[in-house]
Amino acid sequence: MQKFTIHKGLVAPMDRENVDTDAIIPKQFLKSIKKTGFGINLFDEWRYLDKGEPGVPESARKPNPDFVLNQPRYAGASVLLARKNFGCGSSREHAPWALDQYGFRAILAPSFADIFFNNSFKNGLLPIVLPEATVAQLFDECFAFPGYQLTVDLERQVVVRPQGEEIAFDVQPFRKYCLLNGFDDIGLTLRHADKIRAYEAERLAAKPWLANTMLSA
């Protein structure tokens, strides 16, 4: 998992409340068990005028020119500004996968659905909860100033506006530790790889018949 320390990026405004996971990545794309290739289908039903199907290249699609991510001023955005209850609906890790693979590193919103919030941390995406009034101000600034960028400093737990004003945010210490070090659940386990190997060797030495049992399973 990619580490998150300090990120400065162009902001894209998703000016809708209650954006659910089926809007983030529609159900037909959940057939794949791979963790890659979902970025081109992020917000698929809003982003394109034609119906999306797995395996269809982006070059063959019809972009919706009115959708925010298709507007030239937001090309290359890596910070998503959203309204309340972002990521509601069904549970699917594909939603943070799609956002991450599109290029987003952080999402700022007044609130998130719990499962989406947890899945985001586990996949290297930083969801930041800010007061609704503060988010509204950031929307106003983003709309008013083309090229609007924000800096997210996870170590210091602040979002830095272009003029230098800092907005503090909370993050659970364990989640912060994992993001700063790039540890997903597997990475956390592999920190103890030497102990795991030593235990397996010791167990097989004491119970050698387990080797045959495992081979025949």
Image (spheres, helix red, strand yellow):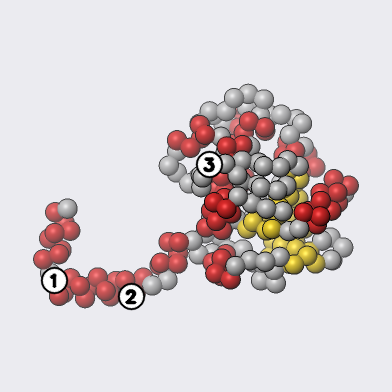
- Category of crowding for the residue at label 1, using alpha-carbon neighbours closer than 10 angstroms: few (below 14), some (14–19), many (at least 20): few
User: Which amino acid type is marked by label 1?
Assistant: Lys
Q: What element carries label 1?
A: loop
Q: Which residue is drawn at 67% across and 42% down?
A: 18
Location of residue 209 with respect to 101 vertically, above or below: below
Location of residue 140 with respect to 28 vertically, above or below: below
User: Which amino acid type is marked by label 3?
Assistant: Ser
- Category of crowding for the residue at label 2, using alpha-carbon neighbours closer than 10 angstroms: few (below 14), some (14–19), many (at least 20): few
Alpha-carbon distance for marks 3 and 1? 45 Å
| 93 sits to left or right of 49 | left
Q: Name the residue under label 1.
A: 207
* Residue 22 location, quadrant: top right
Report x, y in % for residue 38: 55, 41
| 149 sits to left or right of 92 | right
Mark closer to the observer (2, 3): 3
Q: Is mark 2 on a helix, strand or loop?
A: helix
Q: Mark 2 points at which residue?
A: 195
Camera-nearest residue between 206 and 37? 206
Q: Name the residue under label 3.
A: 90
Q: Which residue is drawn at 87% across and 63% down?
A: 163
Q: Which of marks 2 and 3 is nearer the N terminus?
A: 3
Report x, y in % for residue 10: 76, 52
* Residue 151 location, quadrant: bottom right
User: Which amino acid type is marked by label 2?
Assistant: Lys
